[in-house]
Amino acid sequence: MAFAICTVSIMPIRSASDDKSEMVTQALFGESLEIIEQSANWAYVRLSYDRYEGWADPKQYTIIDDEEMNRLATAPMYYSSDLVQLISPVKSKQIIPLVMGSHLPGLFQNKISLAGVDYSYEGSALAATMEKKRKNIVENAMMFLNAPYLWGGKNPFGIDCSGLSQMVYKISGIIIARDASMQANQGETVNFITDALVGDLAFFDNQEGKIVHVGILLGDNKIMHAAGKVRIDAIDHQGIFNVETRKYSHQLRIIKKYV
């Protein structure tokens, strides 16, 4: 099996080997991946971070050998924590924009090495092993407020509901799955909304009973979620109450805690 590293800011992962196909998720700079299947113009890949699979453009990643993959997998992991920051290959001095949550494996003295290329990074970073605190979840969530909704998106310039919960938890030191239905199978169930705490995740289903939405509880009967944009609405035992339309928009199914 071959391995690779994402060396562009944001790499779309698609449902089919076509630029016009649905984007199901994104890989960010510094994320490693396994190449499961390779064709002339596309590769079917599995992201190392959350094991999510889809089709990627090989021009957007760099092949690495087993030794480099092992080095990256065991290196201390850091995530960029500025909304937007820049990283530069030392030799070329070109710039690559980084969005929050990009991977910086082995960051040391403002430098990382990926696939034999040394990069200089002057921004802020968080260690993946940071102490997990509920207040950090809420503080990090606020960084995404008003980000536009984008199916499959995982960054402050376009994000979906489960991408929001995954990324906020990621930069808070907690790894959860990619999709809402997968996230709902993790964590510990909270029996009543009155027992829920700040930072817990609330999940919502459709008429068929399928989990289709997720949001981050903020306390004071408020929830942050991605619906058109990342927004804050009211929530009660019935579901999300849209403060603009004055109607319920999502039906509450279950609440989970991960801290």
Image (cartoon, grey):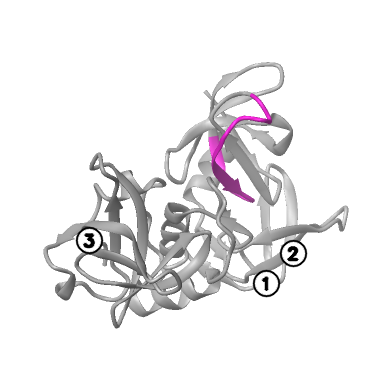
Residue 89: percent from the left, percent from the top?
A: 79, 55
Which residue in the protein does label 1 denote?
123
Question: Circle 3 — which element?
Answer: strand
Which mark sits nearer the N-terminus, 1 or 3?
Answer: 1
Residue 171 visible in the current orientation: yes
2 and 1 marks in contact (CB < 8 Å): yes
Q: Position of residue 244 (x, y in %)?
A: 45, 73
Task: Name the residue located 70 percent from the left edge and 67 percent from the top edge.
Answer: 85
Under mark 2, the amino acid is Leu
Which residue position is annotated with label 3? Answer: 255
Instruction: Pinpoint residue 92: horizontal percent, then vertical percent.
Output: 88, 53
Q: Which residues are magenta?
A: 18-33
Helix, strand or loop at label 2? It is strand
8 within the magenta span:
no
Depth check, front residue: 215 or 130:
215
Closer-to-camera residue (117/52)? 52
Residue 33 shown left or right of residue 168 in the figure: right
From mark 2 to mark 3, how far is it between C-alphas? 37 Å
Disc 2 to disc 1, C-alpha distance: 7 Å
Residue 28 lies within the magenta run: yes
Residue extending farthest bottom = 220
Disc 2 marks which residue? 86
